[in-house]
Amino acid sequence: MRTFSRWLLAVAMVFAGLSHLFWGRKEFQAQVPDWATEIVPLDKDAVVVGSGVAEILLGASLVALPRERRRVGTILALFFAAVFPGNVAQYTEHRNGFGLNTDRARLVRLFFQPLLIAWALWSTRAPRP
């Protein structure tokens, strides 16, 4: 079950990364909070491209580096935690995107981030004996 879950997460990450680079690029730019470009000296497009590349690499690493899966899972969990403030900003700034066009929908989304973190950690750990 963990292997299937890890592969599913890998596919989801690569898909999400590709969407950052291609068909969803403009919509992702609209979701980058203004303060993010003040913290790092990048424009919103560069933040979207960088996060897309990171998602593709992390997703591919979940499959291509089986001996490093625990480390990759930890890095992926940290990545999910790092982007969480952007999700909070989308909620607090009432920014629409990807069907999240109500405060309720944006709020519900926030509760999924801890689940993604748990998924990354659980799917990359060996089961306990």
Image (cartoon, rainbow, N blue to C red):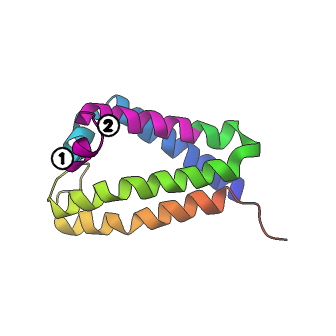
The structure residue drawn at horizontal position 19% and vertical position 42%, both measured from the top left corner, is 30
As measured in the structure, the alpha-carbon distance from the residue carrying label 2 to the one carrying label 1 is 11 Å
Rendered location of residue 55, percent (x, y): 48, 40
Give the position of the N terminus as an image quadrant. Answer: bottom right
In this view, 101 is above or below 48: below
SS of the residue at dot 2?
helix
| Residue behind mark 1 | 34
Give 62 or 84, whichever is nearer the viewer. Answer: 84
Give 18 or 41, whichever is nearer the viewer. Answer: 41
The structure residue drawn at horizontal position 50% and vertical position 43%, both measured from the top left corner, is 13
SS of the residue at dot 1?
helix
Main secondary structure along the magenta-highlighted residues? helix
* Left or right of 93 on screen, residue 98: right
| Residue behind mark 2 | 47
Which label's residue is closer to the chain start, 2 or 1?
1
Inspect the magenta stretch and tell me whether residue 61 lies in it: no
Residue range of the region highlighted in magenta in the rendering = 33-59
**Few, some or many C-alpha atoms within 10 Å of disc 2 (few <14, some 14-19, many ≥20)?**
some
Considering every residue shown, the one lying at the far left of the view is 94
Quarter of the image where one finds residue 127? bottom right
